[in-house]
Amino acid sequence: MRFKRQSGAALIMAALATLIGCATTIDDSGIEQRTSSAVGRPVGSFTISDRSEESGGRINYTVKTRDGATYRCYLYSPTTFVKVMTFGQTPNSDAVCSAMGRGGAAGGASTCNALLKAAGKC
């Protein structure tokens, strides 16, 4: 009897992990804050669209600024399952963004940072 109770509990835990394991844990405000730092624009001066989530917690999206610059961005957010298993100690990543077409980071010094300078892109 004792073995059956333990295997039943394990089955319930596995089912719960499956149900809660796929959703990322970052909200829209967190994405906007990280994107603001990545593109060097204040929150509210850009829009986020084409958001999609991959397994493993990667979130892909497009950013368009008021002045016409477009960026393709991604960040990692741990799934609910990972957050639970690490007692909330797995953080969300910073946003990583690449300028797309004209008007992006390579187009002006206002969006130039140390990494772009080192790469000779500004």
Image: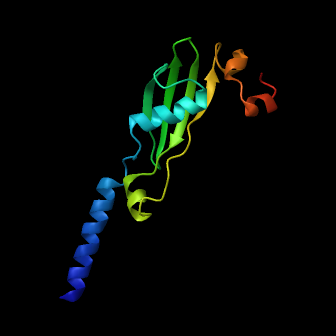
State whether residue 69 is above or below residue 4. above
State whether residue 72 is above or below residue 30. above
Q: What residue lies at 47% left-to-right and 59% top-to-bottom?
A: 89
Q: What residue lies at 56% left-to-right and 11% top-to-bottom?
A: 67
Q: What residue lies at 29% left-to-right and 73% top-to-bottom?
A: 10
State the image coordinates of residue 79 (x, y, percent, origin top left): 41, 51
Q: Quadrant of residue 1?
A: bottom left
State the image coordinates of residue 66 (x, y, percent, origin top left): 51, 13
Q: Quadrant of residue 121?
A: top right
State the image coordinates of residue 65 (x, y, percent, origin top left): 53, 17
State whether residue 90 is above or below residue 57. below
Q: What residue lies at 29% left-to-right and 54% top-to-bottom?
A: 19
> Observer-nearest residue: 65 or 1?
65
Q: Quadrant of residue 49?
A: top left
> Observer-nearest residue: 92 or 74?
92
What residue occupies the far bottom of the structure in this picture?
A: 1
